[in-house]
Amino acid sequence: MKEEIEKKLIEKTAKVLGVDASTLSGDTNIKTDIDLKSLEMAGIISQFEEEYDCYIKYTELMHANTISESAEIIAKQIEG
């Protein structure tokens, strides 16, 4: 599940930032490499919540540094 979430997270992040998804990877640092704003991340998270009909605790994601770490947190919360 984590790999699926990571791929979708990369696609959604690229769309929000207006960049090509191939420029992002699991190792991309969301704080320093792409400077993803909290409002942008909240929008991405809400898409996952709608798609998987779940609630994702945004506060846990604040500790993630990379897209891969974020995907792992999201996957765990989706799986329950």
Image: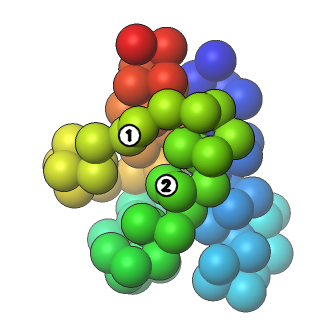
Pointer 1: what residue? 56
Pointer 2: what residue? 45
On the question of residue 65 being in view, the answer is yes
Image point (47%, 77%), residue name: 40
Is 76 positioned to the left or the right of 46 in the image?
left
Image point (75%, 58%), residue name: 11
On the question of residue 27 being in view, the answer is no
Q: Which mark is residue 34?
A: none
Image point (44%, 67%), residue name: 41
Specify how the rendered protein is coloured.
rainbow
Image point (81%, 75%), residue name: 20
Residue 35: x and y in percent read 39, 81
Quadrant holding the C terminus: top left
Using the image, determine if residue 76 lies above or below residue 60: above
The image quadrant that residue 53 belongs to is top right
Dot 2 lies on which element? helix
The image quadrant that residue 70 belongs to is top left
Contact flag, marks 2 and 1 (Cβ < 8 Å) = yes
Q: Earlier in the sequence, mark 2 or mark 1?
A: 2
Q: Amino acid at mark 1?
A: Ile
53 and 41: which is toward the camera: 53
Q: Residues within 10 Å of mark 2 (few under 14, many from 20)?
A: many
Q: Amino acid at mark 2?
A: Ile
